[in-house]
Amino acid sequence: MTTHSPTRARNPLRDRPVYVVGIGMHPYVRPSATTYVTMGLTAMREALADARIAWTDVDSAVVGSGKIGMAAGPTLTGYLGRTGLPVVQVESASASGSVAVRQAVHDVAGGFSDVSVAVGVDKAEFPPDAVTKAEVHALTDGLIQFPTKFALITERFLQNRGATLEQLGAVAVKNHRNGALNPYAQRRKARTLDEVLAPPYISGSLTRLQCTPVGEGAAAVVVASAEGLARLGIDRSRAVPVLASVHHTQPAFADAEGTEEEAVTRTAGAEAFEASGIQPADLDLVEVHDAFSVEEPMYIEALGVCREGHALADLAAGRLDIGGRVAVSASGGLLAMGHPVGPTGVGQVCELVRQLRSEAGPRQHPAVRHALAHMVGVGGVCTVHILGPVGA
């Protein structure tokens, strides 16, 4: 079997740099009567205003959505005006928004567009998934849902690390504290360790506050080439360079050490670091897929942000706090910011840009120069983005 190496593909960003020039969001909220069109347009208009460009300046758009169904992309963008631009709708479960950003970035890096918009949007709906229609049955079909899967992973993780529930619960304490400072977050209340560990239990030892909430929202980013910046007069001093935009699916069995999510994270992370030319130690800010509290330490170790087996110790020492060695989930992460699926990965990029521009207000991490966003999804997928110093 031939496996893919981190250097399997040329990095198009080295030949044609791409910059994030605009960001916008609709706050993540509990299920509501607000339509996905209203939420999506809110995020897109805010992103266009942030970039100081018009919809007619956009060459292409990519809409990431996991739950609202077919034709959501052209339906949404049509309300901004019929300009004839290509609109693509992508779905990759939790990574839908991250893939939308990657597609927009590669559209510009490949020379097909000078300006592209990626928007993630979803309602709190749960349509049937394709996995259940595959007619390839497993012994656990219908018995293990995501919370139970990660409750089992939690037990193994704690046993392997010799760690306690209190040490792991500190992940949620940190992220709820950060989310309380984020006006776009669904959960905006700081929590004590006692509150985090208190029932109700969702599955196993995972309590409600150690699981991401059900919600909805939207997020958008505008990306542009250097030519696009010059032609449209976009402020270069607020433009954030994309150093890497990587997507992987299902690592080869030979590479699948640990959980599938850890394995694909290691593979995608290695390629992203190779493409960007930086190392994990260079990162100042990291946003990861922490839908359950155990995921944050799993992924930051898989990415090399923390040494294997040291994430919880680094957390306890404050090294992962805002103001610490590297701020992890400064937005509040999926645990507090929320995880409406389609918008999640786009919202992570918005957070990275705010921090790199020093526009994150009370949750600002000092002197951010390099930042990483990580998302995994059903099907063994992982997307990693690395952004560089503003104005570079």
Image (tube, grey):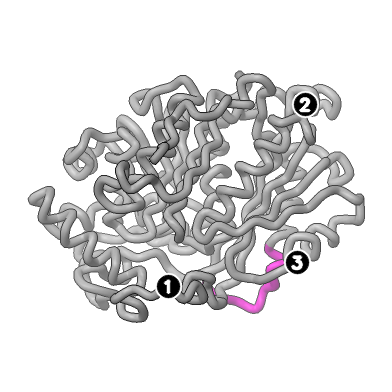
Q: What is the quadrant of the C terminus in the image?
A: top right
Q: Is residue 51 above or below residue 369?
A: below
Instruction: Give the main secondary structure, helix, strand or loop, of the magenta stretch.
Output: loop
Answer with mark 1 or mark 3, whichever residue precedes in sequence. 3
Q: Position of residue 219 (x, y in %)?
A: 62, 53
| Residue on which disc 1 sits | 136
Q: Position of residue 146 (x, y in %)?
A: 36, 69
Q: Report crowding for label 3: few under 14, some 14 to 19, many 20 or more residues within 10 A (C-alpha).
A: few
Q: Is residue 363 above or below residue 11?
A: below
User: Which element type, helix, strand or loop, lies under badge 2?
Assistant: helix
| Residue on which disc 2 sits | 229
Amino acid type indicated by mark 2? Leu
Residue shown at 46% from the left, 51% from the top: 381
Start and end of the magenta stretch?
30-39
**Which disc is residue 154 wearing?**
none
Amino acid type indicated by mark 1? Val
When asked about the image quadrant of residue 15, the answer is: top right
Q: Are marks 3 and 2 in contact (CB under 8 Å)?
A: no
Answer whether residue 367 is visible to the viewer in this image: no
The CA distance from mark 2 to mark 1 is: 49 Å
Q: Is residue 1 magenta?
A: no
Q: Is residue 36 magenta?
A: yes
Amino acid type indicated by mark 3? Ala
**Eye-nearest disc, 3 or 2:** 3
Asked if residue 73 lies left or right of residue 17, the reply is: right
| Residue on which disc 3 sits | 71
Asked if residue 281 lies left or right of residue 345, the reply is: left
Q: Report crowding for label 2: few under 14, some 14 to 19, many 20 or more residues within 10 A (C-alpha).
A: many
The CA distance from mark 3 to mark 2 is: 30 Å
